[in-house]
Image (cartoon, rainbow, N blue to C red):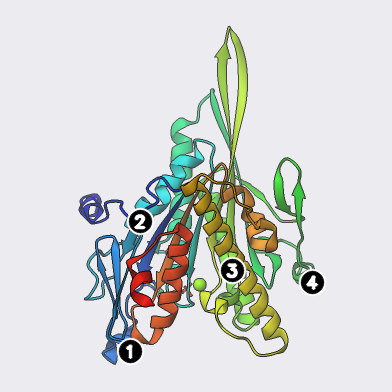
Amino acid sequence: SRGRVKEQWRTFSKGGSSGENSAISVAVRVRPLTQREQQVGTKCVVSLSGKEILIHHPHTNRQLTFSYDYCFGSQNPEDKGYASQEVVYCLLAQPLLDKVFEGYNTCLFAYGQTGSGKSYTMTGYADEVGIIPRFCKEIFWKVNLTQQEEEKHHIELSYFEVYNERIHDLLSSKDANAKKKALKVREHPILGPYVTGLSTYVVGSFADVQTWLELGNKQRATAATSMNERSSRSHSVFKLVVAQTKREHLEGEAHDHMLVSHVNLVDLSGSERCNLAQTSGLRTQEGASINKSLLTLGKVISALSEMSQFKRKCFIPYRDSVLTWLLKESLGGNSKTAMIATISPTAAHVEETLSTLRYASQARNIVNVAKVNED
Ligand code: ADP
Ligand code: MG
């Protein structure tokens, strides 16, 4: 399997028209056709060619081209660069993991319309594990490798949802009523934003992590079934705090110094909520607030991208939404960010796909060929 992965790697040499040194790396992943789509002979309008993605617009007959750091294909007949869960992990997430041990904060998030593969990419299945479990497994593999007298690690995790601009603990041991209470965000002058009353657990092994992940995913699924459409409207954040103590000897004296990094792995709400004109009542409110988090995230990322690219100072509107406020420490500054935009390959979804690709391009401030073609 290692050999196969190596083979696939060659297809994915890092590229892109700009942002080589950007703090944000952006990838796009195409989901395969569903069984139903295959049965009815659905055509793919998306094809991949190296670091470029081509969209054949079914109505205008025009071809639009976008490019990113990586384009990951599925096993659809039109896709060239098929990327397994392992390849996606190795290319996009592993570079962040290395940064964690250097003391950087990191953030990886999945953006895309409902049903395009965000949860598949972030969580996956038992036999096709996604980024979150792989990341945790490798953290402990590295920790065990370096764990000695001179270097100690302390790792904590939490798992929560942001739904309708409110935070819900996915690892709470409280009773059902207490769980319904939304948690608040506060900002510590030195330690930054945090969630009051959120369960955090110390984990000493990958097995510990798995236990909490399973519980959190179960609570997520339960919340989704009891509340219609919650799974597509909520953002889920899996968070690790990795503290390393390193002992150094200076002039015969031992000095401990500590590095703390925050890791946020985020499965965003369905991006269709960003465009949809909602009608009335609760739907409006939900639509509006999810809209707010996603829109603010877009603004934050594009401002950060601009700042790193043009070395100019900009105002970053972190506090305009709950999600961006909480991610403040791991977006920009001393941090490394990656985004994976997931898309559907079919003609029926082409408008959503284009909107996702534009969001991803904006995140990287790429001036695309597509932008010229479109107008
Ligand atoms: P989202 O979280 O964006 O709503 P899901 O991750 O639940 O979407 O994906 C929808 C369906 O498509 C699931 O059945 C999932 O297994 C499948 N799927 C998505 N992306 C892939 C992929 N790259 N490879 C295989 N199956 C995928
Ligand atoms: Mg999902």
Q: CB of residue at label 2: within 8 Å of ligand 1?
A: no
In this rendering, position of residue 359 left or right of residue 185: left
Give the distance between the C-alpha atoms of the residues marked 4 and 2, in whole angstroms.
Answer: 45 Å
In the rendered image, the residue lying farthest to the bottom is 40
Q: Secondary structure at mark 2?
A: loop
**Disc 4 designates what residue?**
177
Q: Tell me the amino acid under the disc marked 2.
A: Asp
Q: Earlier in the sequence, mark 3 or mark 2?
A: 2
Residue 296 picture location, percent across and down: 61, 64
**x, y percent for residue 287:** 64, 79
Q: Is residue 244 visible?
A: yes
Q: Earlier in the sequence, mark 4 or mark 2?
A: 2
Residue 169, percent from left and from top: 68, 63
Give the residue at mark 2: 69
Question: Label 1 belongs to which residue?
Answer: 59
Q: Is residue 115 left or right of residue 104?
A: left
Label 3 sits on a secondary structure element that is: helix
> Alpha-carbon distance for marks 2 and 1?
28 Å
Residue type, numbered disc 1: His
Residue 338 horizontal/vertical position (percent): 46, 54
Q: Amino acid at mark 4?
A: Asn
Which quarter of the picture shows residue 163? bottom right
Mark 3 vs mark 4: which is more N-terminal?
4
**Front position in the image: 207 or 322:** 322
Does mark 1's beta carbon lie closer than 8 Å to ligand 1? Answer: no
Q: Quadrant of ligand 1?
A: bottom left
> Label 3 amino acid?
Leu
- Say few, some or many: other residues with alpha carbon within 10 Å of mark 3 (under 14 / 14 to 19 / 20 or more): some
Mark earlier in primary sequence (1, 3): 1
Front label number (4 vs 2): 2
